Amino acid sequence: MKYVYGPVFSRRLKNSLGISTVPSKVCSLDCVYCQLKHTTRLTTERKNYISVEEIIEEVRNFFRYKPKDKRIDYVTFSGSGEPTLHRSIGSLIKRVKSISSVPVALITNGTTLLDLKVQKDLLSLDLIVPSLDAVTQRIFKKIDRPPAGMKIKDIIESLVYFRRKFKGKFWLEIMLVRGINDTPAYLKKMKKVVDRIKPDRIQINSPVRPPSEKWVKPVSFATLKKAKKIFGPISEIV
């Protein structure tokens, strides 16, 4: 299969069947910690990068021939780029849900939620996991390297707005990189923003696989524990 992969065991989603909706490293950010290396096409353009019918046929084939003992906890739109850049993501979600009763999740960097059409497309998800690595523009540019003109304050407001409408599970991922967004003062600033978003769960992470930039280092476990204490009882280290 070209677009459906796994199932793979995920620390967050257990046994996850992945779906890629864009070619490798078509993304709206170029995060310094990305295990998939540099973004080769930094874009916010939404279009049908991959045939909807080809993706759906692969999903059908998987469930048609899946061994009965193969447990799937989530079908997850993720892959090797930003999945919501696919213009037909709403249709893809609904069609996947019509094929199987397995919950459907989406892992996103959250940037396309600036578009109200994207927000509407994602309302039928069972679980969304957006990321939030920064709450100030300087740190946003340093860790996530957005395209020119993209503002973290606008992304934050879109997350707050979408959360009010979304009825599924909403987990927020925070990636901590040593020396960038890991000080107690900055984590407390992030906590104020997270409290506005009101996620069901906060997943605190740090790079464990070879990152895009060699200078990127994970934070210590002690820092992760401090972050968990700051973010409170709905947070977990993953």
Image (cartoon, rainbow, N blue to C red):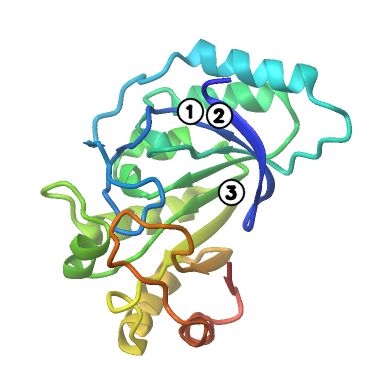
Residue type (three-letter) at the residue carrying disc 3: Lys
Which of marks 3 and 1 precedes in the sequence? Answer: 1
Residue type (three-letter) at the residue carrying disc 2: Ile
Quadrant of the image for the C terminus?
bottom right
Residue 133 in the image: state x and y as whole percent.
Answer: 35, 65
Pointer 2 with pointer 3, Cβ within 8 A: no
- Distance between mark 1 and mark 3 Cα atoms: 16 Å
Residue 4 in the image: state x and y as whole percent.
Answer: 58, 27
Which of marks 3 and 2 precedes in the sequence? Answer: 2
- The residue drawn where x is 37% and y is 53% is 34
Dot 3 alpha-carbon crowd within 10 angstroms: few under 14, some 14 to 19, many 20 or more = few
- Distance between mark 2 and mark 3 Cα atoms: 15 Å
Pointer 1 with pointer 2, Cβ within 8 A: yes
Q: Quadrant location of residue 176?
A: bottom left
Q: What is the secondary structure assignment of the residue under circle 1?
A: helix
Task: Give the mark toward the camera: 1 or 3.
Answer: 1
> Residue under circle 1?
90
> Residue under circle 3?
167
Residue 93 — which label?
2
Q: What is the secondary structure assignment of the residue under circle 2?
A: helix
Dot 1 alpha-carbon crowd within 10 angstroms: few under 14, some 14 to 19, many 20 or more = some
Q: What is the secondary structure assignment of the residue under circle 3?
A: loop
Task: Give the mark toward the camera: 2 or 3.
Answer: 2
- Distance between mark 1 and mark 2 Cα atoms: 5 Å
